[in-house]
Amino acid sequence: MDGVTEGALRQMLQRAWGWGEVRLVPLTGGHTNRSFLVHGDAPPCVARLSWAGKAAAQVDREARMLALVAQGLHAIAVPTTVPTLHGAGHVTTAAGQWLHVFERIEGTSGLPSGVPDACVQAMRALASLHDVLARADIDTGNPVAWLLTRYRRVRSRGMPPCMDGLVPGREYDDVLTHAGDCLARASTSAWAAQRIQWLHGDVHAGNLLFDGGRLRGIVDFDEVGQGSAWLEAAFAAFALSRDATCEDAFRFDAIAWERSMGSYAWSRSMGDVAMWIAHRDVLATLFCVDQVLIHLEAAQRGLWIPGPGMGFLGGWQTLLAQASPASAAGDASQRRTASTVTSLVSAQGDPSCRQTTASSPAAD
């Protein structure tokens, strides 16, 4: 926990929130924060501890957007802050970490099996969320503003140590340069610059909570930002339809993607999705950029190391093939396959690489 023991965390909860004895149950590890179910004298809730050095502006953005959504989104639950004894929304540690407590949302993260309309439910909920977030004022006309913000943060730091042995330095630079070029083109694309507004920033199955086959909540508003609602919808559809077993490239179910996008468009009365289907290859590349940046930034913070099934390897290989075809098509024995990564991860230790939810300990 970045130097904070569970004992120290319990003391912070007892002192700031006034609870007696509490027990902490770690939730699945996240890319940005560490979260725990709190049992005992506390009401059903989740404690979330950020990484050290998290910017106050980011905390403020999340709080403002959650307050807005809580007022306007009624069918789907979002995290509700439990204030401290003194009415504060959080406390901070000596190391500069932010401790929040949220009311627990009942449900299990991830798409439930045997529920054929789960993706449709997710996309309709995203449409409702976007309708509410669209009420907030924006200060950009860039459709990929939130991605550019993340890209600049990643670019300002070096290659994370956990990538050593997996990615040559030249290859790392090639992929990031290509990612920057893709974002620059998207920034000036007229087709992409539609419905620019505030966004959730990280919609995927692990941030959706289902209970009894119904979508109950959307969590993890840590990465809220501004950009095209259509782009976030496309990214969500890719995340929900991707083939998690493919590590050598990004693969997804095209029919499921189109159905998901259609559900979103219908819910927001936005017409057909023909233009977005026509640009699907570009959207898929931008989704790979998004996934690679999310994972690299988490690795730079020491919160994640590469592992199979997480969406990073396929995205990386896709961008590498576009940026440097010769490198991507090199000797097959030198490819960083899922088995290669698994071996390297085992040598480095267990990865903290699953996305945090704000409710359930179940895996995504």
Image (cartoon, rainbow, N blue to C red):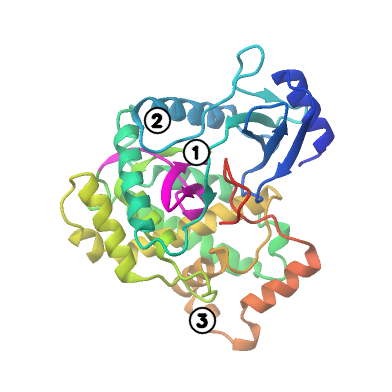
Q: Which residue is mark 2?
A: 69
- The reply to whether the C-beta atoms of the residues labelled 2 and 1 are less than 8 Å apart is yes
Image-quadrant location for residue 194: top left
Distance in Å between CA atoms under marks 3 and 1: 39 Å
In this rendering, the answer to whether 143 lies above or below 131 is below
Query: Of the residues under marks 3 and 1, which one precedes in the sequence?
Result: 1
> Image quadrant for the C terminus?
bottom right
The residue positioned 27% from the left and 51% from the top of the image is: 264
The residue positioned 59% from the left and 64% from the top of the image is: 172
In this rendering, the answer to whether 326 lies above or below 15 is below
Residue 61 placed where, x, y %? 48, 29
Residue 179 in view in this figure: yes
Of tags 3 and 1, the one toward the viewer is 1
- Mark 3 burial class by Cα count in 10 Å: few <14, some 14-19, many 20+: few
Q: Which residue is mark 1?
A: 221
**Which amino acid lies under the numbered mark 2 shown in the image of this protein?**
Val
Q: Secondary structure at mark 2?
A: helix
Q: Where does the magenta region start and end?
A: 195-221
- The reply to whether the C-beta atoms of the residues labelled 3 and 1 are less than 8 Å apart is no
